[in-house]
Amino acid sequence: MWFRLWRLAEFIVTSDTYSAAFDAILWTAQQHNDNQEQAMSENQLISLYEKLRDTVGNDEISEQQKYLMDKVEYHIHNQEEPDPDEPGIIDILEMLITELEADHPKATLVVKKLLDTLSGMGI
């Protein structure tokens, strides 16, 4: 697909009358790429969250840890909704790292990957 778009773009660039069409093609290609990256990032977040749940298990965590993990789940699965007044996802993940680091070092690494993924998404 990209090759065909590039070839079309080369043709359009040589013709001044079609520069608006060229801009539209580039914009469409960028939007397609952005949508794919967003979907990949969202899938990564969900996958990392599931890995976090599997790593700590529900039986081995305190009430505070469970509360924080529930908040993370809410933020990940409800990304389109506005953040509630409570702490944002970054603050919650940082609190979760503090809570998990002593008893669950592997889970702490997963939470740090969640933070890195969110950072890569510009959050």
Image (tube, rainbow, N blue to C red):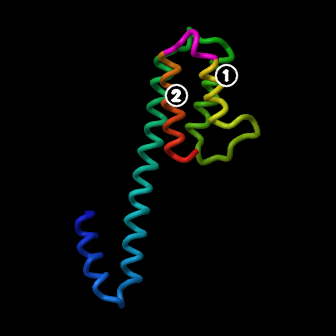
Nearer-N-terminus badge (2/1)? 1
According to the picture, the residue beneath numbered tag 1 turns out to be: 67
In terms of depth relative to the viewer, which is nearer, 68 or 98? 98
What is the secondary structure assignment of the residue under circle 2?
A: helix
Q: Mark 1: give few (<14), some (14-19) or many (20+) Cα within 10 Å.
A: some
Q: Position of residue 62 (x, y in %)?
A: 64, 11
Q: CA distance from mark 2 to mark 1?
A: 18 Å
Span of residues in magenta: 99-105
Q: Position of residue 110 (x, y in %)?
A: 48, 25
In terms of depth relative to the viewer, which is nearer, 116 or 58? 116
**Rendered residue at 59%/22% (across/down):** 97
In the picture, which quadrant includes the N terminus?
bottom left
Disc number placed over residue 98 in the picture, else none: none
**Rendered residue at 41%/76% (across/down):** 23
According to the picture, the residue beneath numbered tag 2 turns out to be: 112
Q: Position of residue 4 (x, y in %)?
A: 23, 69
Q: To which quarter of the image does residue 2 belong? A: bottom left
In terms of depth relative to the viewer, which is nearer, 102 or 2? 102
Q: Is residue 68 left or right of residue 56?
A: right
Q: Position of residue 74 (x, y in %)?
A: 61, 34
Q: Is residue 107 above or below residue 91?
A: above
Q: To which quarter of the image does residue 19 belong? A: bottom left
Three-letter code for the amino acid on which mark 2 is drawn: Lys
